[in-house]
Amino acid sequence: MKMNLTKWSKRNVTVSAFLIIMAIAIYNWFVTPHAHYLMAAQKYQQTIDSLNNKNKILNNDIRIRRKKLDNLKKEFEQEKQSFFDIEQAKTFLSNLQITAQQNGCLVENIRFMPANNVTDRKRENTIIHQYQSDLTLSGDYGSIVKFINVIQNRPEKVWVESINFGTKNTANGDLGCDLKLSIYTLKVMERIENVSNKK
């Protein structure tokens, strides 16, 4: 009887050991890879979520910066309209006498000053010049005011720096008027780093 028990015990131990080994093998073959896969999938999802959040933040930042840039461009375009370009300035100044005559004024004297550079050092890529002219006109008050309104009624700004009226000894009672006018030209220079070399 003792011998049968020992055989049975050895057989049970062997079977139990075999079952344990099989369970470990099955666990290693099936459960462990799935566990690693689930952990990897979880880390992958966390990484994707983190990248998505960063992407949203960057896109939002880009959108805000683009909006600011668009606003600055609009402001610049509005400011730019108040300046003459070189050709417009030449045309405007050369037509002052004709414009005065068309509005009932006689230009007795006109003098143009040399261009004055007023470029801001902070804006190295822009060149601003001031052009001034002194005019001595004669005509009735309404004609002189009309002339001033006409030259100022344009997108580019014309500054009346000074104006002096005086009476003239004429039969029709014309006024004399000394005017100092200023206009500004704007030229925006391309920066070298903004220009792409095309070959």
Image (tube, helix red, strand yellow):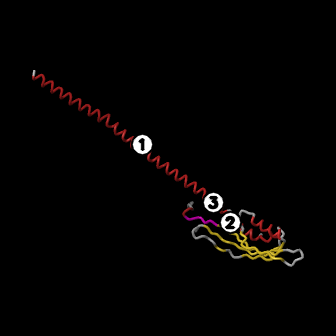
Q: Residue 13 lies in magenta, yes or no?
A: no
> Does 72 appear above or below 161?
above
> Does 66 appear above or below 137?
above
What secondary structure is found at the residue carrying circle 2?
loop
Along the line of sight, the residue nearer the viewer: 132 or 90: 132
Please tell me whether mark 2 or mark 3 is closer to you in this view: 3
| Spot occupied by residue 32 in the image (x, y as percentages of width and height) | 31, 37
Mark with earlier residue (2, 1): 1
Pointer 3 local density, CA inside 10 Å: few below 14, some 14–19, many at least 20: few
* Residue bounds of the magenta highlight: 187-192
Q: Which residue is drawn at 75% across and 73% down?
A: 163
> Does 40 appear above or below 102?
above
Amino acid at pointer 3: Glu
What secondary structure is found at the residue carrying circle 3?
helix
The reply, left or right, for residue 12 in relation to residue 110 is: left
Q: Residue at x 84, y 71 (%)?
A: 140
For mark 3, what is the residue?
75
For mark 2, what is the residue?
83
Amino acid at pointer 1: Gln
Q: Residue furthest right?
A: 171
| Spot occupied by residue 138 in the image (x, y as percentages of width and height) | 82, 74
**Image quadrant where residue 97 sits:** bottom right
Amino acid at pointer 2: Phe
Q: Residue at x 71, y 69 (%)?
A: 159
Please tell me whether mark 3 or mark 1 is closer to you in this view: 3
For mark 1, what is the residue?
45
**Image quadrant where residue 113 sits:** bottom right
Q: Which residue lies furthest to the left in this view?
A: 2
